[in-house]
Amino acid sequence: MDLFEYEFMLRALVGALIIGLAAPALGIYLVQRRLSLIGDGIGHVALTGVGVGLLLHHSPVITAVIVSAVGAVGVELVRQRGRTSGDLALALLFYGGIAGGVVLVGLSDDSSNANLMEYLFGSLITTSRQDVIVIGVLGVLVLVAMLALRPALFAISNDEEYARVSGLPVRTLNLLMAVTTAVTVTIAMRTVGLLLVSALMVVPVAAAQQVTRGFRATMTAAMLIGVCAAAAGVAVSAEVDTAPGATIVILALGVFVLLTAASMIARAVQPRRRKPVEAQPPEHRIAVPWPE
Amino acid sequence: MTVVRVSRAAVAYASREVLHDVSLEVGPGEVVAILGTNGSGKSTLIRTVLGLVALNHGEIELFGTPQRRFRDWARIGYVPQRMGAASGVPATVGEVVASGRLARRGIFKPPRAADRAAVRAALADVALADRIGDPVATLSGGQQQRTLIARALAGQPDLLILDEPTAGVDSASQDAFAATLTAFQRRGGTILLVAHELGPLAPLIDRCVVVHDGRIGHAGPVPEPAGHHAEPGHDHVHPHAAQETAGICEWAPTGERITAP
């Protein structure tokens, strides 16, 4: 493809492929714990980090990693404490994050709207060589952690209480998940932008689970869908001149719709291979201690 | 050495005390049932033993070690009341059961042949070996409950702690359950279970502990079932009696324990 003769296109592609693999590998655990929107929230917080970086003339990616990691750990601590006002605490954190970001970016010397848009919606084409190295190193770290710790992270996401009784280091693993989420959000910010980060974590998983039966299969399929959508998204966006981040997300959503339709048709056409047990309704023996 | 020793335990949620001065001992190879009505504190008692609920007063020892310093969690297999998050990302029966193996093998080591064999053996124990590759969401409630037992057994524990294992479970699964627990006990295992009623598990129980209003109301052998009254199918409606309990070893809401006449 001639498109990729240009070095900036090649860098864009490499960045997108790494995110396409790493985001769903992390996202599957978030989906399993019903925290699908957490990436979105952390993305809001990361914007404050971008603002801090621009204001201090530091690399916005590094300050965003730090600020969003602090935010993610905060969210995790709120979650551990109990759920009484957790929902509200999260809302405050998220809106504080995005408002803080907008204000700080405005205060910096580099306060053009274009700059803000770059972080909100991604700017793959302007990915520098240094960006690609940062994305590559952090992306591989996230991938290795998510794959190597799969049994433990699966156990925690599936049944946290049971994992605690098994003596797993639940708190440490939860904090690791929080920090990894922050890292993934920040590196994906260049590709799809902070407002669409969560989509790359969640949509490939949602698509994969339409057709899979097990956790490992879902993870593999989601990573495959993520990486294909990322590659195709970069190519299509260059061809028809659209925003790469949004194009990648639209393609992933397209896969979701296709697989959902395919699985519905398959279920309608072919009778169930094994019927769920319906011959034995659960027997609720209700003890009647008192005569009427 | 006792397997579980609870001495003068008190537990409070917020400021409301739900367990007061509870003591309990379970010896090796014993099968002890904790009975009580809903809200009596019986589930809190085992959750405290497992370290899921913090103690306010008192002490707990597991296998002779104070709970704070106890690290050998692989020796304990916990079976919660129901499967968590079965409707999230799909997971196969084998994957869920394999997570019971983590305490034994450690979180960084990939599964070996022995781990896979333990998973298969645990599934065979609960008569679900043929469902190893099926998504748990396609199983019936009773089969999901058996999957949770298999998960606990996969870690080859010395002590099984079960929270209402037969609540809302079909009768086929209840019988499979009783058979699994009997086999576990014959291998020298200790069992501590919470139940609302014993059903087919009754013959297995060595000792009953009745929790009422956060205190131990009765501790001792299971009363001999008297005729058809104690059978699970019996509806316990007696027009001549002013009050009647739900089954053996049950606690009547008035606070008086009534055994079968």
Image (cartoon, coloured by chain):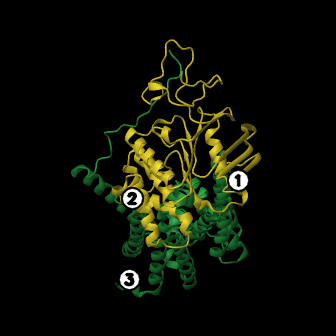
Could you tell me residue B118's position as x and y percent?
45, 64
For mark 3, what is the residue?
A: A3
Shade of chain A as shown in the rendered figure: green
Q: Nearer the viewer, residue B226 or A32?
A: B226
Please identify the quadrant where the C terminus of chain B is shown: top right
**Disc 3: CA contacts within 10 A as few (<14), some (14-19) or many (>=20):** few
Could you tell me residue B54's position as x and y percent?
71, 49
Are the residues under marks 1 and 3 on the same chain?
Answer: no
| Dot 3 amino acid type | Leu
At a point 29% along the width and 47% down the height, the residue shown is A275
Q: Chain of mark 1?
A: B
| Dot 1 amino acid type | Glu
Does residue A267 appear in this view? Answer: yes
For mark 1, what is the residue?
A: B61
| Total marks placed | 3
For mark 2, what is the residue?
A: A209
At a point 59% along the width and 36% down the height, the residue shown is B221
At a point 23% along the width and 49% down the height, the residue shown is A271
